[in-house]
């Protein structure tokens, strides 16, 4: 038996969530922005969205989470052709 996983992306939802996240970050609500960027990544797993999660956590003073997400960003981005 073979299992095949199909990735599905919802770029429109991701863009909407990314815009909302950027707005929250612009207001200084970095924790909420990070959550929205994570939601955007769940909708469309682009490495730049993980990077944005890490940056939002960093700007919000949460170095531990920032480090985690920025490392994931580098790992995922480095695995691309």
Image (spheres, helix red, strand yellow):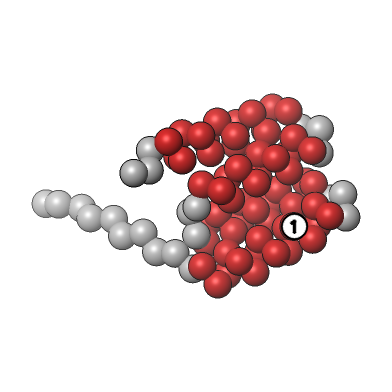
The local secondary structure at tag 1 comes to: helix
Which is more toward the observer, 62 or 1?
62
- Where residue 45 sits in the image (x, y, percent)? 48, 54
Lateral position of residue 26 relative to residue 40, left or right: right
Q: Quadrant of residue 23?
A: bottom right
Q: Residue furthest bottom?
A: 12
Residue 5 lies, in percent from the top left, at: 29, 55
Q: Residue at x 60, y 36 (%)?
A: 69
Q: Residue furthest left?
A: 1
**Quadrant in the rendering for residue 80:** top left
- For the point 87% across and 49% down, the residue is 28
Q: In the displayed structure, would residue 20 be above or below residue 61?
A: below
13 to 70, vertically: above or below: below
Q: Which residue position holds label 1?
A: 22
Q: Nearer the viewer, residue 47 or 17?
A: 47
Q: Is residue 42 left or right of residue 18?
A: left
Label 1 crowding class (10 Å Cα cut-off): few <14, some 14-19, many 20+? many
Q: Residue at x 68, y 33 (%)?
A: 66
Quadrant in the picture for the C terminus: top left
Q: Position of residue 30 (x, y in %)?
A: 79, 46
In percent of width and height, residue 64 lies at 69, 27
Total numbered labels placed on residues in the image: 1
Q: What is the residue that sits farthest to the front in this orientation?
A: 81
């Amino acid at each position: 038996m073979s299992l095949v996983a199909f990735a599905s992306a919802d770029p429109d939802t991701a863009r909407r969530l990314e815009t909302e996240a950027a707005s929250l970050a612009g207001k200084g609500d970095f924790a909420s922005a990070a959550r929205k960027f994570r939601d955007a990544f769940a909708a469309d797993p682009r490495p730049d969205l993980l990077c944005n999660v890490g940056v939002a956590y960093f700007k919000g003073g949460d170095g531990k989470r920032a480090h985690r997400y920025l490392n994931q960003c580098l790992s995922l981005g480095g695995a691309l052709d």
